[in-house]
Amino acid sequence: MERDLKQLFQSDPRRFSKFTLENDFLLADFSKNHLDTLHLLNQEEQSRIELARKQFFGGENINHTENRAAMHFRLRRTSPMDPLDEEVISIRDRFLEFGDQIFQQKILGFSGKTIDTVVNIGIGGSDLGPKFLYDALRDFRGHSKVHFVSNVDGLAIHDVLSEANPETTLFIVCSKTFTTQETLQNAQTAKNWLVNSLSKDAVSSHFVAVSTQVDLAKEFGINESRIFGFWDWVGGRYSLWSAVGLSLVCAIGATQFRELLEGAECADHAFENDPIHQNLPVILAAVDHFYFQKNGFNSKVVAAYAHRLSMLVPFLQQLVMESNGKGIDVSGNSVNRSGVVWWGAPGTDAQHSFFQLLHQGTEKLHVEFIGVTLQPKSDNDHQIKLLSNLFAQSRALMIGEKSSFPEKEFSGNRPSTTLLLKNITPKSMGFLVATYEHRVLCEAALLNINPFDQFGVELGKKLCNELLPVIKKESNSMELDSSTEGLIQYVHRHG
């Protein structure tokens, strides 16, 4: 790029203060980017974001392909503003009460023993959000253990069941439609295990459902009083704030979950009310737009220098790439470029794997560093070294190093953004996740795409259902390409 980051700092000693935003939860440093200002949007781009923001908070059918709103911000409102809010809070109180009873280990199983283990069976949005926060908020957990099963690979559920006690285990079947293939297969395996271990009558004492399809959940054997619903305006990857977060409530309790919601509500208020040029999710989206749409950068690297944020990247991959991995805009026209790849790993591990590529590779990458200033359970020597590594890496990307040996040359001038969280608490995690959600909406507005549908996952599911009878040797009527046919025949010979 034409601008040189070192020169930008040399020409303006106050650059850091001009290119940072700070709030009660974090500091965002944009100064190591090739920017002359944080006013990055032209009038048309700003208008697109302002319109999307207005439609979003106004409850309009912003998800136009499915003709519904996307109102997950309502899930974290603490004070009702209308009858729908009152309904949301009523259902919230119900699942929070149940989850808190598990947290306090006050619920008994079929044989009268205390439930002390929870298995969340879901996939995608019914898995990644709660699993990320369960890991992040380890320091706030009670005594109940929570496991997450998503993969239809039988070893995933086998490994959990092999360590579980059927008398003290509760299963949460988390599926909006109660038809998700992977989830129902795992749920049925868990049900068979429970029935074989205890009794068919034990199912209602050891299974809970989070679903909009009450009848299907009841057919499975789940008591209606233990079926927790939500609404069609709650997309899967935006659903952890609803009863989808029940597994997390079981782990950290209702009080801490409410703190999570309060942090997210703070992010909602900030996104809705902060001026565009001081609006954190807007600027995060605008920086990405600058690099990926206007300067040909290839992918986004997230390096979280905090062990508690180890599951952040998988969560963000779904949130961002399932939302904005679209090739068609809202008018049905082809999008020139969208669906930026997000990837990464925790620092400092990442420094000893792919950071070679970041410093000396030829790919045009943008790095987002995330750090935490205070981690009470980490020894001070560890924390100092951790932050020193974070700051050193962002500086090294920027300044580079000259050498008489070409292979030891570091070009430098490689951009990065740093987010420094004050701490990791339910409230700060709520703020962080909701900020990323709003960032996705802003990026979608700049691309003129719909971030709330996900038709890209449907074709694979359809073809899977068509192939199942062929693989099971129940049918051979399909006309297949030679590759798929050959793979199936290999399984038949060796499976």
Image (cartoon, rainbow, N blue to C red):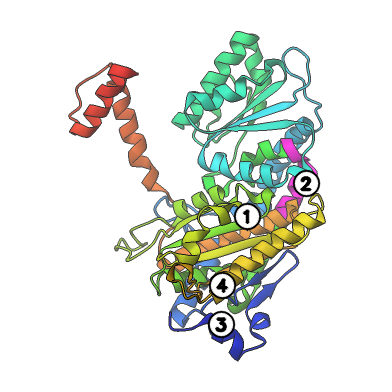
Secondary structure of the magenta portion, mostly? helix
State how far apart marks 3 and 1 are (Cα).
25 Å
Farthest bottom residue in view: 11
Q: Which one is earlier in the sequence, the residue at label 3 or at label 1?
A: 3
Regarding residue 88, the answer to whether it shows in the image is: yes
Tell me the residue at 43%/52% (across/down): 67
Q: Which amino acid does the dot numbered 1 rest on?
A: Thr
**Residue 56 placed where, x, y %?**
54, 62
Please say whether residue 234 is visible from this viewpoint. no
Q: Which residue is mark 1?
A: 348
The answer to whether 466 is drawn above or below residue 287 in the figure is above
Is residue 363 found left or right of 426 in the rendered image? left
Which residue has dot 2 on it?
A: 256
Which of the two discs, 2 and 4, labels the residue nearer the N terminus?
2
Q: Which numbered dot is residue 283?
A: 4
**Where are the magenta residues, as a range?**
250-262
Q: CA distance from mark 1 to mark 4?
A: 27 Å
